[in-house]
Amino acid sequence: MPAGKAKRPKGPPKKSAARKRAAQGVSLSGALAEAAWSEADASLAQALADLDEAQDADDEDAREDALVRLAQSLSRAARKRGLTRIGELNAREPYDASRHALNAAVAKTPKSVRIQARGVARGGDVLEKPRVTPVERKRRR
Amino acid sequence: MTDWTLCIDFGTAFSKAAAAPAGAWTRFDPATVRPLMLNGAGAGNAFLLDSAVFVDEDRVLFGRPALARADALADKKRAALRSFKTLLSVSDLERALNTNVPATIDPHRLFQMRDLVVLYLAYLLASVDRAFVSDPMIAEGQIASQRYAAPAWRSGDSAGMHDIIVRLFGEAEAFRASVGKRMLAPEGLSLRTISDALPKATESAEPLEMGLIFEATAAAAYTSVGLEGSGSHLIVVDMGAGTTDIAALARLGPRTIELPEARVTLKQAGDFLDRVIANRVLDTASWARSADQKAELWSVLMRQMGDIKEAVFVDGRAVLRNQGRSVGLTMRDVERDPDFREFLKELRQAYDHALAVVRDDARARGRSEVQAIAVGGGAGAPFIQDLIQRKSGASRPRVTPRPATPLWAHEREFGGNLAPVFPQLAIAIGGALAPDSMLAARSGITPPANDRSDIPAGRD
């Protein structure tokens, strides 16, 4: 409809073939995702370049520097995509198999675990559970 | 056939638009909120239309092609016209529209500011139309109501400018109808077409039927929609590029009013923060000693400032690469800056003043809650988030901070895809959701922004 008129005439609007194709091919959710990706792409590209520098660094300082920049680029890309972290590093929590990914071979289900790597969520979906290791009990003397 | 409400937000860098079914305010279903894909260029963010016009050798280009051409000719001192939104802030809009355009923008000396604004609005309306018919959910419906969003308090008379703006939109619509499909051609419009059609279109044009919604009110709409028990009073902190504005709104029955005595505008905002950050980095970067080196580093900083600011605000630090060297900056470095500390002090004083006003009003009307929300580019900054947490949970009326992205934007039907881009589209979405009673002006009706007649006192 012409945006300038208050009402569109009754009946189906005329659509060009291109517009029909566009209507069939592009969902709102897909376009929103594409919009977020377009913002994240540049950060991911930087992250890849930073990774090369980290891997090829001549010394520890240069490697540390490149890793800081890599973390920055990846965090930015994640934010643009709406990813959020789950948990706090080194936090101690009661173990829950549905919420944690155990990062060690254990003979017995641990009662308490420590978060070794934070999880990642997007909206209500958990994409990666927090990786945890068992907290060893103090031995009684 | 569904009736839709359309809201256009022509921002400084990008224009956005969104539609919502008429009556969405009372029967809210997040799945029916439709941001419109204005950018048909096939590259970049589909929802953001570049606010740009470029006057070329023999034609005028719009949007992304205008910027590309301006970039290509930058060394010839040519530039695109941008920042149409700033026009809304000038104290004498008519006069600003009738000024001649600088030669860097129009070397032919053919156009006044008004002409280029009308041409861009015609391009924007054509893009809205294309987006509307391309969306399968809304294409079978009709636009029953349309409005545009504008800052409320910059000049203190945005509502007074409404008649001029709807006239501009009307001229744009008449021009768009006259040139038809050529309006969206990537190669733009020839000067001949424009000189033939524009005078006739502007002569015959009628003001477009559009409402005006203040940006703070749009923020109130997307924050409060669907919340049964949400408070009637709202304090909005809007940190944009040029100013930080604090406003208070009261939703009373079907109407929303602004509390003008709460309104505060600070001249420090995003651009000010950019300068603080850049100066701190220059102080740290010991290798940049000469004026040329400093100028080069400043230029690199400004190009990457959006990313640097985001990293400092969210992660607490940012690292920048320049000439093979890395330079870091932390949020603590920013907080140590004397200018920043002064700004923070003024900001807190301004917020506390506005909060006192809105709480007094809420108390006088027997209301129990004030919602606090941050909007604009600086909404995510830690000191802005700290600000809206101030005095939360205190005595009645209690202050409840609301997230910058409302919970409904995380609903499953969006597949997690709306929330990351919500801040960019927020004002257009809020403007489309708001009921007519929240408008600052309708076609032919321009009530004072602080009109309080017919508002009964009542309790939650």
Image (cartoon, rainbow, N blue to C red):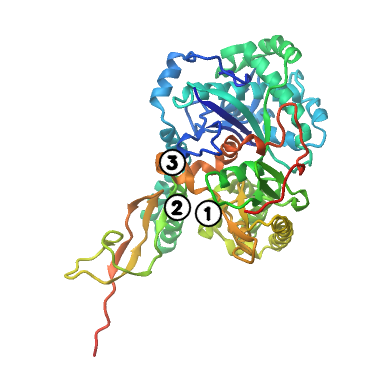
Disc 2 secondary structure class: helix
Left or right: residue B328 compared with residue B294: left
Q: CA distance from mark 2 to mark 1?
A: 8 Å
Image marks 2 and 1: residues in contact by CB distance under 8 Å: yes
Residue sitting at 67 percent across and 55 percent down? B276
Q: CA distance from mark 3 to mark 2?
A: 17 Å
Give the image quarter of residue B16.
top right
On the question of residue B106 being in view, the answer is no
Chain containing mark 1 = B
Of the residues shown, which amino acid type is indicated by label 2? Answer: Ser
Q: Nearer the viewer, mark 3 or mark 2?
A: 3
B345 relative to B208, above or below: below
The mark nearer the N terminus, 3 or 1, is 1
On the question of residue A30 being in view, the answer is yes
Residue that carries the numbered disc 3 in the rendered image: B417
To the question of a shared chain for discs 2 and 1, the answer is: no
Residue that carries the numbered disc 2 in the rendered image: A75
Chain containing mark 2 = A
Q: Give coordinates of residue A37: x percent, y percent.
A: 44, 39
Q: How crowded is the residue under tag 2: few (<14 C-alpha within 10 Å), some, or many (20+)?
A: many
Residue that carries the numbered disc 1 in the rendered image: B311
Q: Give coordinates of residue A98: x percent, y percent.
A: 28, 59
